Image (spheres, helix red, strand yellow):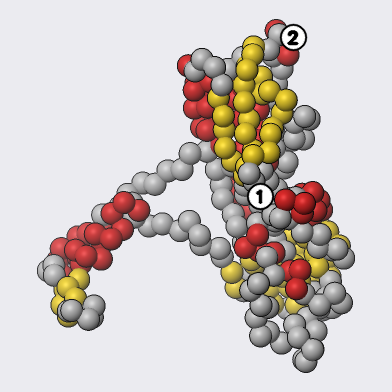
Amino acid sequence: MVPLPAAIGLDDTGTRPLGVIISHGDQDHWGLAPQLPTDIPVLIGEGAASILRAAKFWGSGVDLHEAGHLHDQVPSTLGSFTITPYLADHSAYDAFSLLIEAGGRSLFHTGDIRGHGRKAAAFERLLADPPAPVHAILMEGMSFRAVDPDDSDSVERDSVERDSAGKIVADSKPAADSVAEAAEPAPELTSLTESDVETQLAETLRATTGLVVVLGSAQNIDRLVTVYRATLRAGQSASSGARRCAGRWCGTRTRSLPSDHQTAAPRSPGEARPPRR
């Protein structure tokens, strides 16, 4: 077990933190929470907390015994701090960015955030109407990219020379070339949106005879909705919803839907109510 970090107030010494806020239910954000002293309150989205409790039997969840819940743009207070959650577009259900204010200063923590999921409108809303003023931004960067990832090694390799110890010894290109390259636009990077995945999966379903199995995180509600919508677009049905398979879900299609079932598919939370099983 990974121990709690030696932070002030997390052991038996020092002043207790006023609380712990968990932006969403990915395990790299809550993994040490079960070790927190029980007198430290925990806040998290209500839907995220419910999913984690439901997943506890499998080992990929936890009962946080949370003291309160985060709701989109509804402020909460912890001592002199005001925390305002902003619904975020993320594969994890009920994810939030957090505006934290105290003493006339404010920090905005993006949490895990994207703009190509089924709640992209939440991201666009944030861009159009960001909180203000914000004095500091704490931004997640797990997918920050400025160049094509396939060429990322060549950028450094081409621009500098290193000795046997790996130290930079000289520029390998004239300064003029470096300036010219800096003026060139960065390669355009695109990510598949959930709508793109839905369209491609529907095409695969239509072109495939027999069983189709889709593997994905059991807590990725956006992707579950994508699979469901793709089966409707392809004129197929997901057999008995989703099956648990070694920590993954396997959605399958086996037969055509009657014509009276060709209805508009549901969308993911933040976009609309999730589908019923």
Q: Secondary structure at mark 1?
A: loop
Which numbered disc covers residue 260?
A: 2
Classify residue 159 by image quadrant. Answer: bottom left
User: Quick check: 277 above or below 14?
Assistant: above
- Horizontal placement of 197 versus 21: left or right? left
The quadrant of the image that shows the C terminus is: top right
Which residue corresponds to the image point at 72% horizontal and 51% vertical from the top-left? Answer: 58
- Horizontal placement of 49 versus 244: left or right? right
Q: Which residue is the site of mark 1?
A: 92
Q: Nearer the viewer, residue 84 or 6?
A: 6
Check disc 1 and give the amino acid type.
Ala
Which percent across, then down, holds residue 25? Answer: 70, 56
Farthest front residue?
Answer: 246
Which percent across, then down, holds residue 238? Answer: 66, 23
Is disc 2 in contact with disc 1, using a CB cutoff of under 8 Å? no
Badge 1 density bin: few <14, some 14–19, many ≥20, Cα 10 Å: many
Farthest top residue?
Answer: 259
Badge 2 density bin: few <14, some 14–19, many ≥20, Cα 10 Å: few
